[in-house]
Image (spheres, grey):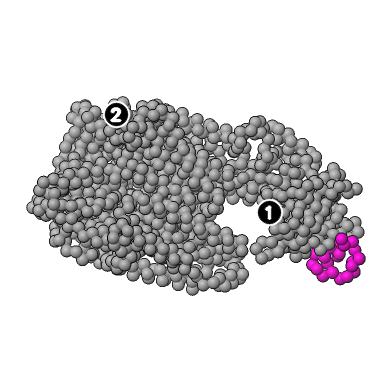
């Protein structure tokens, strides 16, 4: 354990240079393609940049949660589904009283803190459940969270029988308006970065990811820590759900479908290793931006949305393969 | 376990609906018919899981294969031809195309898994996304219709069941009687031991994933023949059912353990559950939530079996 | 009693990046001879074994086996010419039964259809029983999976695998490290049986008592080099220990270094 | 709703036992997550239950194979009639044949089957003509704008007949006579979703595409477009936004002066019409192949009817 910690602190300062260059490269490619095919700039458009970040803020918040899970050598496929149910729960408690079709006619015009806490609570609870199942039964996390993907989606369909929930109190609109999502994203990123780099929470997360056995021997309560990390990720999904619901001014059972893939893609592009033990929030943020630029760039170039899926699939695999080679060459050296 | 589940539904059936669940000439064949497509996929997935791999792409690969196969299976006289001038081909061509496309996707899954050493759920997750994208792009999201009668025959009556049983039998024999099977179990059981024994691990993994892809392709063919059309949304989440069937049937996610016969039973249990929920008129939401818990329960049970036996050995 | 030279290495060297795991190892073993390799952790014993069994390829040096220069690209190459190895991690597949493990990677088949060849289970079972008989190993039920067996039984299966294929040289890497007293005795008895049958053996072991009891010659590795070759009948534990640790007192200065 | 669901789960036995004498209708919905389909489904459920009948609902998840399986399960479970909105219109011949040979009444609703000519007797289609929806949408826009302006189209899911027909109708209208001053400058697939609609329009705006007209295949995407336009600081008086469905959200937006055109697709009419058709056929009545539930363009003049 001592050795491990020494290794970790002795490691050269985080370098996101490589991935940052990829970001620049991708932007340049779209810039060139932009001039060639559209006759206009892609990047030097303040409005577009703002929008790219705004659109990615929600995925970004999810990805920050997923980053911590992957650093711990876990995985979470249930983020999108949890956002679906958390958004619906929050929305159902944020309705105005002049709405004849309110989910809970008795609970309308509530102070905004109540729907927010309810959404966060549900998401955190489901996240904790993921962690508990993984910690206690020790089944592979991707299976546990795959089951949660199905369960949480079923819950969100059950909750209002698939009915859309709209008409929110004005205060609830705040979370999705203007640049608020970006500020929340940044806040979450900074906090998580500090948590990961400066606190025992972070130290333990890295320790479990790099050698769970050693972490256990060193007296870390691995099971409890896993529950904590998955629950925190759930909390972040809850935040993402509230921003999404507020921004869309509506919640429905299909919200968040497949978003977990975008989040995982952002994380692995950002250099977090699926082997665990390695990863940074800064990398994830760059990964999120790369994904945002690609999505936005495809729309900008007028390429069909379905191409984006194919490209996304390829990017996820490529990023992980690249990580694998980094990992291997490190081992050999 | 199969009997238990079936008996449970039988009892509930008499209690709640006042009729038999199992002893219904209509229901039993339909249960088997419905699961035969998932079953074909599950036979491939079982082999992948025995090597301690996983394949999350089967549903999407089946959809992609269905689109390609159907485009070669159009009858003349239809007004929406995918290929102008290609019509009324012998049925073997679309079937072969479907299987080849599936094999191709499986090969890519296997090659990336074997030669880069990334965890298999990543390349197959990528394939899940990418193959669905290809399926949509292939005909701009439109379905492919007007298939030949000989192609549609593959999905009619009990033909899917016969194909499923045939596939299950062939791979049961391959897994239990041939070197292919021996290597598949050996790799899943102890990859290092298999390597030292001179087995070409990478080549074998590629073979297993390719076969699984080919079976997903075949499932796509049967699926489109049954629907008498191909559509990009087909087979959505079938991979989950296939994995669930394999695990319920006793195939261990840790590799090295599993049987096709178990998977066939697992597939039937899933079919009984789905059909039983409809039979008992339980709302769809509960079905979905229940399926999630069933997967979880099966894997947790596997985990405890694994712990117990490996605890006794080394 | 030692006959012709069966295996020779000349200047065998292995570097992992900057780490010199094995330097300039000259080694030989004659037919019928049992040789032990001893040394501290990281002294290069396992590295040496990995080169001569084809698990890894040497950085430099040559291997002569059975009269020819050999280049083993993989363990199967080494096995094909008759070098059988019992690896430290046993290299057994837990979920397979005894014959399946013994024939792993070289199954007997009825006719060759590539990977889809049908296996001749009967023949494999008979040959496995034969191999077990030759080493006087008793395993109650050959169709039990390895995962359900005791450490000693597993070790016996691993050893009988090497014997089944009538090999020219057997290498055992720490065969008794994980075994209890009784099981260790069982394995030692198998080794004595092999000695009687005249099959040459290279034994890697930490157990000096065992080494002195079982083999003819003891090779000592230290820091990647061979630092001594001792006749088991003319040496004792002290001499070996001093060579292993490098703290030679000088008492045995005239011992049979080569 | 939630509470009644919970009770439903607990008391399902009593519930089913008590309804043994009523008819049971099996209903396969193409997608639970789709708002319009949800309105349709819940309206059908409400109507059937108010008449004392059972309705058994399944979600086909936009998958033809799943839908076919569900229908087979309905047949095996001995339902008295089957209702469905088809995942894909082209899959209907196989479904029709299956249900017909089981001798069970069959009602297609909302999504027009390709084999509509083969229906009649114990099978029928209750729905509206999506081409008409697109036509009414485009004509209303044409009138509001005087037939001029740069237009963009937000398309639903490409696979859906409704998306294809509505889009085609819009293009047909703007390519003719008085409306030919409208130029389609961009189109994108928004999957029927509000946030997708918003993101696409935002991306267009940042690429310098500033539409005068937004044609959306449905209201959700239209509402997304309005969000995007508003957050880009564009006055809603300068842009004509049009959708289809007249959902409650859309009506509210229209009253706020943001959404300009929507076309009422009578979900309730389709659903109740479908249930009624099924009940008639169970009683042995023979029906025609098609019952039209008309689309109605919604304007501020007649908006109160749709609240």
Position of C234 relative to C79 (above/below): below
Q: Is residue C254 left or right of residue B131?
A: right
Magenta span of residues = C237-258
Q: Position of residue A189 (x, y in %)?
A: 40, 68
Instruction: Assign the C terminus of chain C to one quadrant of the image.
Output: bottom right
Tag 1 subunit: C
Q: Residue at x 42, y 60 (%)?
A: A266
Residue at which label 2 appears: B77
**Residue at the far front in the pictured view:** A36
- The answer to whether residue A33 shows anywhere in this view is yes
Q: Is residue D61 left or right of residue D182?
A: right
Q: Position of residue B264 (x, y in %)?
A: 50, 36
> Any mark on residue B140, and which?
none
Q: Position of residue C244 (x, y in %)?
A: 80, 64
Does the stretch in magenta take in D143? no
Describe the element under mark 2 as helix, strand or loop: loop
Q: Which residue is mark 1?
A: C56
Label 1 element class: loop
Q: Residue at x 47, y 55 (%)?
A: A318
Q: Position of residue A229 (x, y in %)?
A: 47, 63
Mark pair 1, 2: CA separation: 64 Å
| Quadrant of res D79 | top left
Which one is in front, D251 or B167?
Answer: B167
> Residue B42 vs residue B144: left or right?
right
Please report, as a chain letter, where disc 2 is located: B
Residue drawn at x 22%, y 54% as measured from the top left: D185
Q: Residue at x 74, y 49 (%)?
A: C70
The quadrant holding residue B286 is: top left
């Amino acid at each position: 354990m001592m050795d491990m910690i020494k290794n970790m602190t002795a490691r050269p300062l985080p370098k996101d240079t490589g991935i940052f260059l990829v970001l620049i490269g991708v932007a340049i490619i779209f810039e060139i393609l932009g001039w060639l095919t559209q006759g206009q700039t892609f990047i030097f458009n303040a409005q577009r940049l703002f929008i790219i970040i705004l659109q990615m803020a929600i995925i970004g918040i999810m990805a920050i949660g997923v980053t911590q899970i992957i650093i711990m050598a876990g995985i979470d496929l249930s983020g999108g589904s949890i956002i679906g149910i958390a958004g619906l729960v929050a929305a159902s408690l944020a309705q105005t009283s002049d709405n004849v079709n309110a989910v809970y006619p008795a609970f309308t015009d509530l102070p905004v803190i109540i729907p927010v806490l309810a959404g966060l609570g549900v998401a955190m609870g489901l996240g904790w459940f993921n962690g508990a199942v993984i910690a206690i039964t020790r089944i592979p996390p991707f299976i546990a969270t795959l089951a949660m993907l199905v369960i949480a989606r079923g819950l969100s369909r059950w909750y209002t029988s698939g009915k859309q929930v709209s008409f929110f109190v004005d205060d609830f609109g705040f979370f999705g308006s203007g640049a608020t999502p970006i500020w929340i994203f940044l806040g979450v990123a900074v906090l998580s970065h500090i948590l990961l780099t400066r606190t025992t929470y972070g130290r333990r997360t890295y320790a479990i990811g790099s050698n769970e056995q050693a972490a256990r021997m060193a007296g870390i309560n691995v099971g409890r820590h896993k529950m904590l990390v998955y629950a925190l990720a759930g909390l972040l999904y809850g935040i993402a759900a509230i921003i999404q619901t507020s921004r869309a001014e509506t919640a429905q059972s299909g919200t968040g479908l497949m978003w977990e893939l975008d989040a995982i893609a952002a994380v692995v592009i950002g250099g977090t290793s699926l082997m665990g033990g390695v990863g940074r929030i800064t990398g994830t943020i760059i990964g999120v931006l790369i994904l945002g630029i690609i999505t936005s760039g495809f729309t900008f170039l007028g390429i069909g949305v379905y191409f984006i899926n194919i490209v996304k699939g390829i990017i996820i695999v490529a990023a992980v393969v690249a990580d694998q080679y980094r990992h291997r060459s490190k081992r050999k050296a | 376990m199969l009997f238990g589940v079936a008996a449970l539904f039988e009892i509930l059936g008499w209690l709640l609906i006042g009729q038999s669940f199992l002893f219904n000439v209509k229901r039993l064949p339909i249960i088997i018919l419905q699961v035969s497509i998932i079953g074909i996929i599950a036979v491939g997935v079982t082999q992948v899981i025995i090597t301690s791999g996983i394949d999350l792409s089967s549903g999407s690969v089946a959809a992609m294969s269905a689109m390609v196969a159907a485009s070669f299976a159009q009858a003349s006289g239809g007004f929406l031809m995918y290929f102008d001038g290609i019509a009324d081909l012998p049925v073997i061509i679309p079937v072969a195309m479907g299987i080849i496309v599936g094999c191709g996707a499986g090969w890519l899954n296997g090659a990336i898994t074997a030669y880069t050493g990334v965890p298999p759920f990543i390349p197959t997750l990528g394939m899940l996304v990418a193959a669905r994208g290809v399926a949509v792009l292939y005909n701009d999201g439109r379905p492919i219709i007007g298939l030949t009668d000989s192609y549609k025959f593959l999905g009619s009556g009990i033909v899917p069941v016969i194909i499923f049983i045939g596939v299950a039998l062939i791979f049961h024999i391959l897994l239990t009687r041939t070197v292919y099977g021996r290597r598949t179990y050996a790799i899943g059981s102890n990859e290092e031991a298999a390597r030292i024994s001179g087995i070409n691990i990478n080549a074998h993994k590629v073979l297993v994933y390719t076969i699984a892809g080919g079976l997903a392709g075949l499932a796509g063919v049967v699926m489109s023949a049954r629907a008498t059309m191909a559509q990009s949304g087909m087979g959505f989440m079938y991979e989950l059912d296939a994995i669930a069937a394999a695990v319920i049937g006793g195939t261990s996610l840790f590799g090295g353990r599993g049987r096709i016969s178990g998977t066939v039973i697992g597939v039937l249990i899933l079919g009984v559950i789905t059909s039983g929920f409809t039979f008992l008129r339980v709302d769809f939401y509960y079905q979905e939530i229940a399926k999630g818990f069933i997967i979880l329960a099966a894997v947790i049970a596997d985990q405890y079996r694994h712990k117990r036996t490996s605890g006794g050995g080394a | 009693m030692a006959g012709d030279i069966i295996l020779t290495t000349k200047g065998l060297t292995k570097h992992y990046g900057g780490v010199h795991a094995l330097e300039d190892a000259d080694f030989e073993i004659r037919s019928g001879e049992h040789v032990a390799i001893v040394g501290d952790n990281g002294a290069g014993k396992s590295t040496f074994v990995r080169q001569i069994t084809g698990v890894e390829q040497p950085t430099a040096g040559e291997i002569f086996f059975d009269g020819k220069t050999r280049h083993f690209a993989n363990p199967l190459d080494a096995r094909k010419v008759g070098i059988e190895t019992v690896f430290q991690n046993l290299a057994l597949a837990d979920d397979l039964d005894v014959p399946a493990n013994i024939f792993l990677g070289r199954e007997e088949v009825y006719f060759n259809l590539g990977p889809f060849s049908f296996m001749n289970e009967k023949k494999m079972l008979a040959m496995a029983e034969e191999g077990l008989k030759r080493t006087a190993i008793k395993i109650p039920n050959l169709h039990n999976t390895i995962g359900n067996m005791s450490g000693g039984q597993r070790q016996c299966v691993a050893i009988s695998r090497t014997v089944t294929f009538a090999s020219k040289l057997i290498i055992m890497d720490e065969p008794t490290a994980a075994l209890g007293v009784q099981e260790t005795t069982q394995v030692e008895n198998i080794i004595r049986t092999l000695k009687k049958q005249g099959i040459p053996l290279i034994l890697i072991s930490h157990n000096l008592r065992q080494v002195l009891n079982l083999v003819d010659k003891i090779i000592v590795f230290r820091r990647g080099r061979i630092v001594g070759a001792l006749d088991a009948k003319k040496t004792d534990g002290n001499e070996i220990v001093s060579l292993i640790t490098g703290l030679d007192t000088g008492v045995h200065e005239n011992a049979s270094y080569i | 709703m939630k509470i009644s669901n919970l009770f439903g789960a607990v008391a399902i036995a009593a519930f089913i036992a008590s309804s043994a004498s009523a008819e049971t209708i099996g209903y396969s919905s193409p997608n639970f997550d789709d708002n319009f389909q949800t309105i349709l489904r819940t309206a059908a459920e409400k109507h059937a239950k108010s008449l004392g009948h059972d309705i058994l609902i399944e979600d086909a998840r936009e998958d033809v194979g799943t839908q076919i399986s569900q229908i087979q399960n309905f047949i095996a479970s001995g339902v008295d009639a089957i209702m469905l909105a088809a995942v894909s219109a082209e899959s209907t011949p196989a479904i029709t044949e299956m249900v017909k040979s089981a001798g069970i009444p069959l009602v297609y609703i909302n999504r027009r089957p390709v084999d509509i000519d083969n229906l009649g007797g114990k099978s029928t289609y209750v729905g509206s003509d999506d081409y008409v929806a697109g036509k009414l949408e485009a004509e209303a826009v044409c009138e509001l704008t005087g037939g001029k302006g740069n237009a963009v189209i937000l398309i639903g899911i490409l696979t859906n007949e409704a998306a294809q027909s509505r889009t085609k109708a819009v293009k047909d209208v703007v390519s003719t006579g008085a409306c030919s001053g409208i130029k389609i400058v961009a189109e994108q697939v928004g999957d029927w979703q509000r946030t997708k609609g918003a993101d696409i329009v935002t991306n267009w705006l940042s690429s310098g595409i500033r539409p005068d007209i937004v044609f959306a295949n449905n209201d959700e995407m239209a509402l997304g477009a309005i969000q995007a336009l508003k957050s880009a600081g564009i006055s809603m008086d300068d842009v004509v936004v049009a959708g289809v469905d007249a959902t409650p959200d859309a009506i509210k937006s229209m009253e706020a002066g943001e959404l300009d055109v929507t076309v009422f697709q009578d979900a309730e009419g389709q659903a109740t019409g479908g249930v009624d058709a099924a009940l008639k056929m169970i009683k042995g009545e023979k029906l025609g192949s098609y019952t039209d539930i008309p689309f109605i363009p919604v304007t501020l003049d007649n908006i109160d009817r749709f609240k």
